[in-house]
Image (cartoon, grey):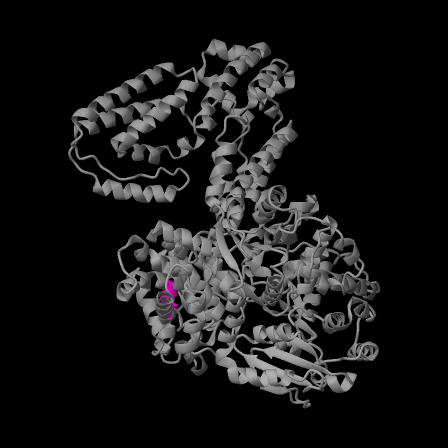
Amino acid sequence: YNDIELNCKKNCDGKNIGTYSTASLLALSIIDLCETFYCHLGVNVPDHAMTFRSLCNLLQDSVTPFVVSVHAKECADPVLVINLTLVCQATLTIRIIGLLQKCTQVFPQRTESLTNSDLPQSLPVVVIFKDFEAFNSQVLQDFILICSRYTQELPFIFIFGIATSPSAIQHRLPHSVSSLLCIEVFHSLSRTQHLASVFDKLILNSQFPFKLSSRVIQVLVGIFLYHDFSVQNFVKGLQFSMLEHFKSQPLSMLCCQKQEALLSAKTLSKKNVERIRHLPSFMRYVETQEPQEQVQLLTNDEHVKVTLLFHNKLHVSCIEKNLWETEEYDSALQLLRILAKDELVAALRKCAEILKSTKILQNVLQQLEDFIGRLEALEEDSSGNGIISGKMEYQRTDLFQLQKTLLEKESRRTKRMNPYEVLRSQVIEFIDSLVREYLTPAELQPLNEVCYYSSSGVLRQRLNVTPRTSIQAALSHPFYYLQNESLKTDAGTISSAAPDLCIVYKLHLECGRLINLYDWLEAFLTVMSAAEDQDTNSEECGKYDSLKHARFIQAVSEMEFLGFIKSTKQKTDHVARLTWGGC
Amino acid sequence: MSHQKSFQYADLLSVLERVVDIMSAPDQYSYPSVFIYGHRATGKSHVVLSIMKDLELPHASVDCVECVSSGLLFHQVLSAFFGPDAAALLPRCPSLSDFVRLYKQMSSNSPATQTRYIILDRAERMRDMDFSLLPALLRLQELVNDNVTVILLSEIVWEKFRPNTGCFEPLLFHFPDYSKGKSLVQILSWDHHPSYTPELYASYINILLGVFFSVCRDLRELRHLAVLNFSKFCEPLEKGEAKESDIHKLWKNIEPHLQRAMQTVYLREVSSVQWEQQQMDEKEATTLRVLSAHAHIELPYYSKFLLIAAYLASFNPARTDRRFFLKSHGKIRKTNFLKKHEKTSNHLLGPKPFPLDRLMAIFYSVVDSRVAPTASVFSQISSLVTLQLLSQVGHDDQLDSPKYKCSVSLDFILAISRCVCVCVRLLDLLALSLVIQSQVVRQERSLFTAVSNLHLL
């Protein structure tokens, strides 16, 4: 079941990328000049591989079979680029006139196999440069110069993946080279827009019963905005949280399509029913019920199952509404308060349409339609009213923008209340009550644990790792990872039972930028001998020393391997610290 | 065709006469090597190749860009003169002596009835190849004992070629630049539109050159621009708003378009097709969109701060860090605050390398919230390096304490800090460090304007 859903999500994401690379394809058919040239824009790197793969496939399917994509790491000099281009085409056996001349040296045996093929000449060769910025500009210049000599026989199309800005072309290529090109710029969707579309398709979709709690979404979006701008990583995070949910929560077996959920609810084992009783949300629910009911709920398994079925239905209906609306409810309400009339009507219409599709809230629908009617009636006689105009772009994703425009609007707002405003406030009150009634936060719903994944801490720990912190934790508190009772120490003391590396690490924290190795060794020996002071014999002392010496040297070299110290030539018998003091 | 050719060459007659002079007696031994230089698009290759074609002389034309190894050059020359079979006899990594031996062997089988020419285009690339190659080619005639002449075509002067061990001096020819008044107008008006008079086209060319001549003298580029903008120029004529004699009116009409074309088409920001579409739309908005597009780079939130921190680390002396980034930094005496060698503006000296630790320390003090030192923060640094916004100093394999430089401009940083400037403190910081630097060098006007911009914010 997990796999199916994973696939589903992957498909969804693939579709997104597919749609936005078709935009660049459209223009391809229009221009077929000597040398066409593409920029594909958008920062950050991990997504690009996927985009280019789908673009590559798309081009291969619909335009020309001769598509090569090259990566900066593989192309240290122009011969390599040409070779890569050739290798791809050699498998396709296309006749290449010009390029072969140069490459006979490198591929003498290939020339014969390539020359006798009667494919049409007009098909262009597409070369995709995945990471334009990373290419050596000399290599690029040479490659373009060479290709420009052969455009008569073989049309070339270059696609440059540029992450920063189109002016990068001018920075990397001199005018003599860039004037050989006919450049066309394509912008990919901005990253945030792309994320929003993924959001719409995956998270705000009632099709998938699996949901994320608001905290988890915050973590994921935070990683996206603050760290990498990578939609792919976002989807991976989503997949990870799903796996984690199904693994850690045994009741997640109920998190599936309605039919299946009902089925599996009927066959719940005794143990699982017990688990349900222990869910905090279920306990809250029980407390609100009648005492009689409470007893029944706590004792009778069958009864629990019945209520479960009932709640499952209720729950699904609650999810239908926007999750985000609960989070941004306040700002949305403020926005509604100042909306112009026609926009309000349109919004209400939309609501009505949504409600029509569900069967539960029929009476609400009635009221809404009533409001719309009254609003429209009002419109006829108060067309001259000073309606607060302004085109509000209702962007849910851009909260900051929203608030800014809100503030502006608020200040401009006129004080007098016209009939429209009176009616509007009525409408808003109505909607407010409606939302308060039906859209309670998901956390308060009984049995939310089944569908909502909420352990944001685990997610943050897994996805946004801090390698340095964990190394430091391991070294200063070995108990944390080793779970050995004897390693438990008070803060500030150094136990001799700890691994050598930990002792050495703790000692080095007390030193300055340069560490005297001999002093360090002395301190190490002191710590080591502290525990065994009582039972050391004087004759064994020398033997132990060489052993301890060896252990010390090994620990120090491990420290060097971990990157805490390095050898220095500034002072003899000293090593330099690479970390800040006291961190 | 021949008419056009003679017309184009008119300017170069004196040079041409001498070139043709050399080639006029094909059955006699010619001068061993000829060096032809002149700016781009002055017709060097075109002249030489058309002479070759018209006089049907045996020649091998090689572009040195393609010759990543000298073996490729030998291969192309041999296969042009003696067929691909001869070229196949070359060993796997042929040396110069292999080439000479094979050439001798082949030419003894089929001795030259007329002078053979080897034309090496973009000859400046030869300097990067084997150092003995150029001197040897210059006296190839002697070496192979055959009637062969090497013609080198280049954009730079012969003095830059001469090896320090000395070599055979080739015959030098200079192709002069086209002058604005005569030849460019003449050449460009050659491809006039059939439905308009040549006089009109010539006046159009005059207007075009008035705008573009100051930035571009490349004939190819100018021709491209002329063809691109001519339809716009003719628009009033088509509509019947002006006559062909109304030069002033036509000029008024086309001038702003040419200015705009200089900003976009010349820089190759838009293709010619897009440009034509924009001309159709006639909307300012589309142009503005294209122009504004390249000022903006989308970066993750922390990357922006990392870049700002890198900039501060690169342009401020490390000693001043305490003063700028610590809240209680104690008093520093004004007089001796900066040492003498620090009194030149850092913006004139360029970015300085800084260690990773310093970058992170400034980063933490610049960012408002507490940031955990996560792996993704560090990976952002390396992705900034791949985007060439930062550059790593020293070797890539230096793992402990790597050093970086910030390679973006002040304007870029100001734009970025404006994006993230929820915190005014950051701007203050930038301003402060700039003020101190600009106090030092009063002449640096740009900094002053930058600082005053900051205060306006």
Looking at the image, which residue is at 79% across and 65% down? A545
Examine the structure image and report whether residue B434 is included in the region drawn in magenta. Answer: yes
x and y, in percent, of residue B111 in the image: 79, 79
x and y, in percent, of residue A348 in the image: 32, 25
x and y, in percent, of residue B243 in the image: 28, 60
Looking at the image, which residue is at 43% across and 61% down? B227
- Classify the position of the C terminus of chain B by image quarter: bottom left
Against B164, is B125 above or below?
A: above
Residue A81 is drawn in which quadrant?
bottom right
* Part of the protein shown in magenta: B428-435
Examine the structure image and report whether residue A122 is included in the region drawn in magenta. Answer: no
> Is most of the magenta stretch helix, strand or loop?
helix
Between residues A535 and A482, which one lies in front from this camera angle?
A: A482
- Tell me if B424 is positioned left or right of B81 in this view: left
Between residues A371 and B343, which one lies in front from this camera angle?
A: A371
Residue A524 is drawn in which quadrant?
bottom right
Between residues A78 and B39, which one lies in front from this camera angle?
A: B39
x and y, in percent, of residue A337 in the image: 27, 32
Can residue A69 be seen here?
A: yes
- Tell me if B27 is positioned left or right of B445 in this view: right
- Tell me if A549 is positioned left or right of B328 in this view: right
Against B228, is B94 above or below?
A: below
Q: How many marks?
A: 0
Against B43, is B399 above or below?
A: above
- Tell me if B306 is positioned left or right of A480 in this view: left
Against A423, is A173 above or below?
A: below
Can residue A436 be seen here?
A: no
